[in-house]
Image (tube, coloured by chain):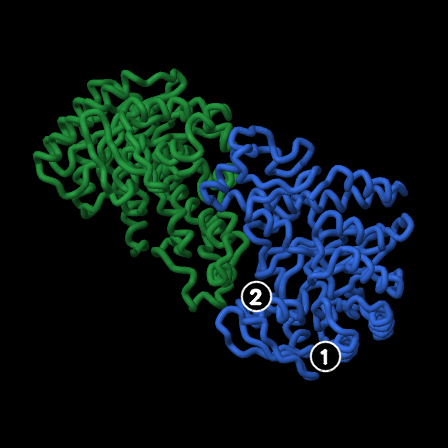
Chain colours: A green, B blue
């Protein structure tokens, strides 16, 4: 069965909805924690459930390299392999080819991308068909089309040629796609050029996907440019399909995205910050290694309902980070993910109450980065 | 309140009992997981409870250096600081002085031990009084006397002089001890010399402690020598107090210890092995990084009831270790600790059933290292 998006409430462009999947129904807008290598670093599926996580994302490129998609297929698919019975989205590998390829060298041809493994430098070749084959074997709930994540800034000519190739890749991927229990999302590219975003969106929608992502953001552009990329693409996306803004996880960006009608986000930010002792709080990020927390026997946030805030103090977490104890990153990952999930819960409630703009304003007045 | 040992069953010298503490009653013989820096690496207190763990051990030397005993005292003691409401035993720092002191250099005087921090090389001075002061502030359920952990092998003269000094240190520590909610154990030294073990045991018991440890084992001696050290000491220890064999965690050593009448053991082994992908199984240790587990979709042990064996395969764990994902060490720590705790549960049942010798024989026939 393919996923189904159900629109529940709308507050101007912001939308509240339900996403029905083969692994349960989840609420949108939602933030998806990233489980790169078939696990959200340090955490169990039960812990993700406890913080209210809906869909998680896992990375096709990484799983292709280790342990290999065939191992996961033999295990019965990604859900079974990693003991996760909620919905999973896999990306296409496109972004990692551009961000992780050894020495950032790659050779983009019409056929696909030649590049070298970030692990051992081995020559690799990823095509739309190969990406689909891997994702079909992983058996995630949602697969993503293989695209070129265009760097920023680029010339109009580069952006146009790349965007057109990504459309051809999307078509090839769709044709090769072969898993009836899996949904496939198209990805809108076009860099910062409004007419290319429009062109890419319309052509992608024409092909008919189960959902649409806005790609090529969070690649170095300033925030206003990113928001405009979303504006320029989202108005051409159908109302009855979910919209996904890729690689975005800063609280302000999530709220800006929701305001524009985005339903789904993903980012490594909460877990990566956690490993470096950075915690989200209502007033902005704090670093728990700071000496001022040495005897601070209050939780990270008095109002947070996560396991970590219920049971541990900043002084204890600081101690764990100072002594390089892995439990620190684990506990803080729980908190940081919960923080973003709670932000989504509050945003959904605000949409239902028709006061999203006010909610966003109040949140951002307190939250300083 | 001081702890109280209650003898329940005896099968020859092996004893089954209960240890009543201010943080609950636990069963003996027991294995105590080690939480060096106020956490059992990667695990939460809830997870320790789930594997049936009784007492955990934490290290005075490490906590003295980071975060410092005063921080923990201000937090309300070690239990509150680390969110652990079960019983905690703290060692005296004596063992770490000898194993961790920078460049292994130390200067043992009658007053105490001069040595350098393993973190920053700073000059440190630990005395029996200081060890008690730190442990009193940590407010563990059981504190340990400050002793010299004698290396092996040593001359009779060295062992005799050291053992006598440890007795003087035990007396000084006992006199300085000042926490009525905390119990204090004496430590029997004497190296491999039976008359020194007898002398040390008798003199330590004369002073009257709440329990007795056998120290100076697992310092390089062969197993037969270690078992003899236990034999030579334990016969002089009172029946109504718990006996603790320090730093021992290999399954065969635990069973040999129990057979000789030991009630408590501790070791970093299960968590350290786990971080290196080594798993306990009924037939011996296995290393999960081994290529033969790549497509092994069975749990580490079909008969194990731990969270990890219930939900994850060897193939998945191998993947986590190969990809250097911290969740691997976490999941395997749960299994390895559960393995030793279950060994203790089975040993207790065998004692009640008066067939401990047979149980031990059958276990060791299967378990090959």
Residue B129 bears which disc, if any? none
- The disc label shown at residue B75, or none: 2
The residue carrying mark 1 is B176
Front disc: 2 or 1: 1
Q: Position of residue B246 (x, y in %)?
A: 72, 60
Identity of the residue drawn at 71% across and 41% down: B368
Residue at disc 1, secondary structure: helix
On screen, B61 above or below A140? Answer: below
SS type, badge 2: loop
Q: Residue B143: which quarter of the image?
A: bottom right
Camera sees residue A70: yes
Q: Is residue A120 above or below residue B266?
A: above
Quadrant of the snapshot with the C terminus of chain B: top right
Residue A114 lies, in percent from the top left, at 25, 32
Chain ID at mark 2:
B
Q: Position of residue A204 (x, y in %)?
A: 21, 23
How far apart, in angstroms, are the residues tagged by discs 2 and 1? 23 Å
> Measured along the vertical axis of the image, is residue A73 above or below residue B175?
above
Q: Residues within 10 Å of mark 1 (few under 14, many from 20)?
A: some
Q: Is residue A314 above or below residue A235?
A: below
Give left or right: position of B101 versus B267.
Answer: left
Label 2 or label 1, whichever comes before in sequence order: 2
Chain where mark 1 sits:
B
- Expressed as whole percent of the image width and height from the top left, the position of residue B180 reads 74, 71
Q: For the point 27% across and 21% down, which residue is it? A: A173
Q: Quadrant of residue A105?
A: top left
């Amino acid at each position: 069965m393919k996923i189904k998006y159900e629109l529940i409430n709308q507050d101007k462009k912001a939308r509240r909805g339900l996403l029905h999947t083969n692994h349960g129904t989840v609420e949108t807008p939602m933030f998806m924690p990233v489980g790169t290598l078939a696990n959200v670093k340090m955490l169990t599926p039960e812990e993700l459930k406890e913080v209210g996580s809906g869909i998680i994302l896992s990375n096709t490129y990484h799983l292709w390299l280790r342990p290999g998609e065939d191992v996961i297929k033999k295990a019965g698919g990604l859900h079974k392999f990693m003991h996760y019975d909620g919905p999973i989205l896999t990306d296409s590998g496109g972004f990692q080819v551009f961000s992780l390829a050894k020495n950032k060298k790659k050779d983009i041809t019409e056929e696909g991308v030649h590049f070298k493994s970030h692990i051992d430098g081995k020559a690799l070749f990823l095509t739309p068909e190969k990406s689909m084959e891997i994702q079909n074997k992983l058996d995630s709930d949602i697969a993503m089309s293989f695209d070129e994540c265009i760097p920023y800034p680029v010339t109009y000519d580069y952006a146009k040629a790349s965007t057109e190739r990504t459309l051809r890749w999307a078509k090839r991927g769709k044709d090769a796609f072969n898993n009836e229990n899996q949904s496939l999302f198209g990805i809108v590219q076009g860099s910062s050029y409004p007419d290319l975003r429009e062109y890419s969106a319309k052509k992608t929608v024409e092909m008919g996907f189960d959902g649409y992502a806005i790609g090529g953001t969070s690649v170095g552009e300033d925030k206003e440019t990113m928001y405009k990329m979303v504006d320029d693409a989202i108005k051409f996306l159908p109302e009855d399909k979910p919209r996904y803004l890729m690689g975005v996880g800063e609280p302000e960006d999530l709220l800006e995205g929701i305001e524009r009608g985005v339903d789904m986000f993903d980012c490594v930010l909460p877990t990566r910050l956690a490993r470096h002792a950075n915690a989200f709080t209502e007033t902005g990020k704090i670093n728990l290694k700071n000496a001022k927390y040495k005897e601070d026997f209050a939780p990270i946030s008095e109002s947070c309902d996560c396991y970590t805030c219920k049971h541990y103090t900043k002084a204890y977490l600081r101690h764990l980070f100072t002594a390089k104890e892995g439990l620190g990153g684990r506990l803080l990952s729980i908190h940081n993910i919960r923080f973003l999930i709670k932000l989504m819960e509050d945003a959904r409630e605000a949409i239902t109450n028709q006061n999203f703009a006010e909610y966003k304003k109040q949140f951002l007045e307190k939250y300083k980065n």
